[in-house]
Amino acid sequence: MTEAGGQPIQHACVCVTSPMRRALMTAIPTAGTLNCPIVCHGGLYEYGCAGLAQPGSSTDELRAECPGLEFEGFSAAGRWDYQGSAQKETEADARLRATRFVEWLHADVLSSRRPLTLVFAHQTYLNLVLRLLLEPETGGLSWSYGSNKYSFQHTACAELQFDSTGSRQWRLTVLNDARHLDGFDAAMKEGSGVCEVL
């Protein structure tokens, strides 16, 4: 994206991505188009995809594959943010991990001047994150695997806004926007896609 004079537009944004490669491969071209940094967050992987038996890819492996990544939320050993004691992540582990990510997101969004944070992650985990953001008193407690209150369609987008001056709360404004996909109009006509403007 360029201004009329051909100069790149500088965006005050950041792409925050899961360490899982399918999310990284979406975040990288988006960040390139927007000319913004990519933060790979060790706590953004899909529910159940790490544990003692599978610590996930290391920051060294990710850096070799995707130079230029910044890293947050990884363990001291450079592995994904799994702090439980099971071979595979439990629901309780996921709730704690999502709480850590939401705390980091609040601190990052509230302490920075970036008006836009793009998060690239996964359906089940994002459902939990949305519950924690939108229902801070009960959202995490009411979440269990399969209870997708905020159900994402595959490759769809959601938009949240944070009121930094008034209520200081998050608000979900769009859910399941897939206009970026080829054939979106045809899919909508066939009823296979639903974009909810809230």
Image (cartoon, rainbow, N blue to C red):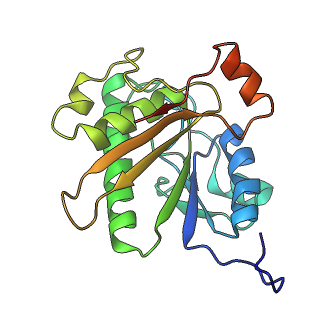
Q: Residue at x 38, y 53 (%)?
A: 161
Quarter of the figure that contains the N terminus: bottom right
**On the rendered structure, is 65 left or right of 155?**
right
* Residue ranking furthest to the front: 189
State whether residue 100 appears in this view.
no
**On the rendered structure, is 28 left or right of 86?**
right
Residue 33 place in picture, x, y as percent: 75, 62
Pick the front one: 80 or 134: 134
* Residue ranking furthest to the left: 137
* Residue ranking furthest to the right: 6
Residue 175 place in picture, x, y as percent: 48, 34
Kindly indicate the quadrant of the structure image that contains residue 147: top left
Q: Is residue 86 above or below residue 61?
A: above
Q: Residue at x 65, y 69 (%)?
A: 36
Task: Give the mark count.
Answer: 0
Residue 164 place in picture, x, y as percent: 28, 65
Pick the front one: 156 or 32: 156
Quarter of the figure that contains the C terminus: top left
Q: Is residue 60 above or below residue 80?
A: below
Kindly indicate the quadrant of the structure image that contains residue 128: top left
Q: Residue at x 29, y 59 (%)?
A: 163
State whether residue 182 appears in this view.
yes
Q: Is residue 50 above or below residue 188?
A: below
Residue 49 place in picture, x, y as percent: 55, 29
